[in-house]
Image (spheres, coloured by chain):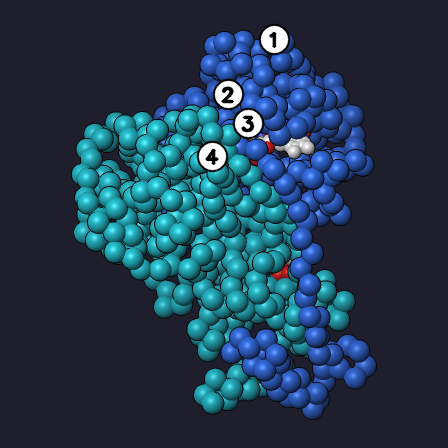
Chain colours: A blue, B cyan
Amino acid sequence: MKIVVFITQTQDTEARIKVGSSGDSIDTEGMKWIMNPYDEFAVEEAIKTKEAYGGEVILITAGPQRASQALLQGLAMGADSAVHISDEALGETVDSLVLSKLIASELGKIEGVDLIFTGMKIIDEESVQVGIQIAEELGIAHLALVSKVIDVKPDEKKLVCQKEIDGGSVSVEVSLPALITCPDAMNEPRYASVPNIMKAKRKPMKVVSLDDVDFGSLGIGRDAVGKSGAKIKTVSLEVPEVERKLRIIKGSDETTVKGDEIAESAKELVKLLRDDAKVI
Amino acid sequence: MSSEIWVVADIKADGQVRKVTFEVLSEARRKLGGSVCAVLLGSGVSDKASELAGYGAEKVYVVDNPNLKDFNPDGYVKSLCELIKKHSPAVVLSGNTAFAEDYMPRVASGVGSGLAMDCVDIGMTDDGRLKIKRYSHSSRAISTQEFSGDGSAMIATVRPNSFKEEEAAGAGQVVNEDVGVTDADIKIKVLEMKTKESDRPELTEAERVVSGGRGLGSEENFNHIYDLADLLGAAAGATRAAVDAGYCPYDMQVGQTGKAVSPILYVAVAISGSVQHFSGMGSSKVIVSINKDPEAPIFAKSDYGICGDLFQVLPPLTEELKKALSE
Ligand SMILES: Cc1cc2nc3c(=O)[nH]c(=O)nc-3n(C[C@H](O)[C@H](O)[C@H](O)COP(=O)(O)OP(=O)(O)OC[C@H]3O[C@@H](n4cnc5c(N)ncnc54)[C@H](O)[C@@H]3O)c2cc1C
Ligand SMILES: Cc1cc2nc3c(=O)[nH]c(=O)nc-3n(C[C@H](O)[C@H](O)[C@H](O)COP(=O)(O)OP(=O)(O)OC[C@H]3O[C@@H](n4cnc5c(N)ncnc54)[C@H](O)[C@@H]3O)c2cc1C
């Protein structure tokens, strides 16, 4: 099985975030960049599939120089090689259509790909589209929100999965090659240990510069990479602070309510919901 | 490019039109100008056209084809791409559902359009470009974005419960379209579909939501959540930790991976309050939490709460609520 995983670096959204001076993006000064958490599930699923059926796992990212850290992490988890489409312009807003064309064209150079895994979304921009758009560029089937890979049949070139839909789930079969987007329910991603990160540095990493990209064949100009080429532009961004009332009823010792306090707290909460919040 | 504003109807497993479709039709009429039309794709759905006209659709484009079923994106992608290429609408909208997240990115790619997912506000710039607001960064940031106006259809999906639905008589002229979706277009073979009927409101549409976390401890104990939800006429939700532990099904998950909800009342029982969970419910109007840990992060983001053991607090709380609701 030849398996490809698209991974990307994202801002750590659990960290403190504030609006940058331009007013249309998050301040990235001192920002911690991590592998997009959903991409960790994608890498894990790829490695599990390789372990079960043999083959190799290739990672692809399009991003600035720092994105090589995410590739190293994926290689340390067990991927075999990586492709880095590298340019500082890829660290800014890039149209998802442009990204999907860039990535699809690199993917097209790898022969005999059977299976592609991507994250379901990235946690900073949350555009929820690049993975699936690459499938459209390649003209192959995509399966979104796959919660379980049920059966891989390498000889028949088929795959059976469970995927989540509104109000339930479906089990589906597709012919390979196919692209799968991964939510968090799939698996438990393994850690990249320090020794494995050291070893990962010796694994093959191909760096592709935008100068090497044949933009003509992609039907876009090089200037499409960047804010000016975007079909959707962010004009302003806010990090709103929601004020909450913080009326938490605690016990007399400032911990849990106990004894008679329990019934009292229930009464008081209902009163607050009725008279103060007016929601019941 | 025509001046038509399209709203793609979202049809549920039971064949009914999802409420968000009416919300989007209503808001499009209020905010976007132009001629608001509906697009109805599916198998055996033609009779729904009049419902869409009831929310102001001037035209209803219908593709009724046996290959459009089972939430299988392939036929929908082909149909919508063909319709967009043929009629060049200015704007294409739909509700943001798991299904829209599945097929819309491919449609945008197929017709070379920009796509904004999960918008909570829509409007037009003076020069006729779609302008939207959407959350990003695990819903901690909200951005205003504008389409560049390059002539391609401007596509966006809208978060359920963002707008009020409002009936209005539209002409509802039915335009039957045959885009010729054949078996060969369908790459995904659906082997089995499991959908469950629930008497409770849907999470994304509900005005009240009661959710449980890992602290519930078992599938059986989740009945506490269902009972409280039923008492309040609420939908039932859960955290990833509760879903992972097998206490409840995946489609109850609220958060970054799961559903985004913004009800009037959100009750969080035995939930610690992670960034990822808040990503899906942080915009709720009133948040109430019950947790036995006085330091639980959720208390710092709640309006009201009780620090106590859920098994001790819920019985008297249920009694008090029953009294208050019967008054
Ligand atoms: C200041 C700033 C800095 C940014 N820095 C980066 C950066 O360093 N790297 C970066 O990728 N984006 C960066 N972006 C975001 C970038 O502009 C795009 O918004 C983003 O990569 C597009 O992904 P999406 O939100 O559409 O992803 P989604 O559609 O939400 O992602 C789905 C999946 O697609 C795949 N995927 C997405 N993007 C890529 C990619 N670039 N390479 C490989 N696979 C991918 C992943 O598997 C991902 O899980 C930055 C944005 C800003 C504003
Ligand atoms: C990529 C990614 C995506 C994710 N997406 C989501 C998502 O969509 N939704 C989501 O919810 N999470 C998501 N998570 C997981 C998230 O990080 C948290 O792990 C999860 O939300 C924690 O769930 P919890 O609050 O139920 O469990 P815990 O954090 O274990 O909290 C349980 C709480 O219950 C309280 N408790 C225990 N017993 C009692 C009792 N008897 N009475 C009262 N209180 C009690 C405890 O004090 C504690 O605060 C995601 C994580 C990742 C990495």
Q: Mark 4 lies on which chain?
A: B
Circle nearer the N terminus (2, 3):
2
Q: Mark 2 lies on which chain?
A: A
The nearer-to-camera label among 4 and 3 is 4
The nearer-to-camera label among 1 and 4 is 4
Q: Residue A212 carries which label?
A: 1
**A34 versus B286 height, above or below:** above
| Residue A80 image point, x, y percent | 63, 22
The verdict on a common chain for dots 2 and 3 is yes
Cα separation, mark 2 vs mark 1, equals 14 Å
Cα separation, mark 1 vs mark 4, equals 38 Å
| Residue B191 image point, x, y percent | 31, 42
Callouts 2 and 4 close, C-beta under 8 Å: no
Q: Badge 3 local density, few (<14 within 10 Å), some, or many (20+)?
A: many
Query: Which quadrant of the rendered structure holds the N terminus of chain B?
Result: top left
For label 4, the residue is B127
| Residue B109 image point, x, y percent | 43, 28
Secondary structure at badge 2 equals: helix
**A28 versus B38 height, above or below:** above
Callouts 1 and 4 close, C-beta under 8 Å: no
Q: Which chain carries label 1?
A: A
The nearer-to-camera label among 1 and 3 is 3
- Residue drawn at 74 percent across, 45 percent down: A18
Secondary structure at badge 4 equals: loop
Q: Which amino acid does label 2 sit on?
A: Lys
Q: Mark 3 lies on which chain?
A: A
Q: Badge 1 local density, few (<14 within 10 Å), some, or many (20+)?
A: few
Secondary structure at badge 1 equals: helix
Callouts 2 and 3 close, C-beta under 8 Å: no
| Residue B260 image point, x, y percent | 52, 54
